[in-house]
Amino acid sequence: MLLIAPLTSLTLGLYMLAEGNSKDAAILFGVALIVCLISAALTLPCRYTIEKQTLHIRCGIIRLRVPLTDIEQIDKSSSWLNGPALSLKRVLVTANGKAYLISPNDRDEFITDLENAVAQTLQKPG
């Protein structure tokens, strides 16, 4: 989905170039480059790290920290809703009434690891 706009601009730019319209082609190539840069800034890197006390969500310039003690529910999801996830094979993490959609590489292993981390955090005194 992220590649549709830049690929369309590149294709139209190549067509314009073949038609001898180099100014329009340059504009379309510029648009493709700008869209690629914005997409990369908003999506890369995309990773989720379970730390001692928090779930750290990083997707491009977006950085979120969710305290493990605040996590209420962890479920598999295929939601199309917006979230820091690059796949529709997602995990829905609910904490303090907020929903976080993430897409770890190994969804089942991540869910198990996160559930274990939450359980360990809740068992610790104080």
Image (cartoon, rainbow, N blue to C red):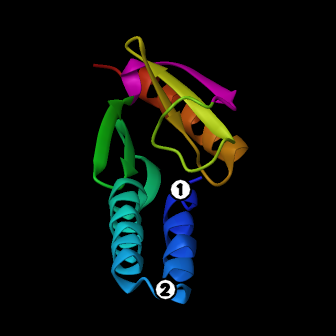
Spatial CA distance of label 2 from label 1 is 24 Å
Disc 2 marks which residue? 17
Front-most of 37 and 61? 37
- Residue type at numbered disc 2: Leu
Q: Nearer the viewer, residue 42 or 71?
A: 42
Extreme residue toward the top, this view: 97
**Residue carrying label 1:** 2
Q: In this rendering, would 40 be left or right of 65?
A: right
Q: Measured along the vertical axis of the image, is residue 56 above or below residue 124?
A: below
Q: Secondary structure at mark 2?
A: helix
Mark 1 element type: loop
Residue 35 appears in the rendering: yes
Q: Residue 107 at x, y = what percent? A: 68, 44
16 left or right, relative to 112: left
- Residue 79, how many percent across, how many down? 64, 29
Residues in magenta, as a range = 68-79
Q: Residue 90 falls in which quadrant of the image?
A: top right
Tell me where residue 68 appears, x and y as whole percent.
40, 29
| Residue 124 visible (yes or no) | no
Total numbered circles: 2
Q: Quadrant of residue 14?
A: bottom right
Nearer the observer: mark 2 or 1; the answer is: 2
Residue furthest front as drawn: 20
Picture residue at 63% right of the left edge, 48% below the top: 87
- Whether 55 is among the magenta residues is no
Mark 1, other Cα within 10 Å: few <14 / some 14–19 / many ≥20: few
Left or right: residue 35 compared with residue 4? left
Q: Quadrant of the C terminus?
A: top left
Query: Closer to the N terminus: mark 2 or mark 1?
Result: 1
Residue 21 in percent (x, y) is at 43, 82
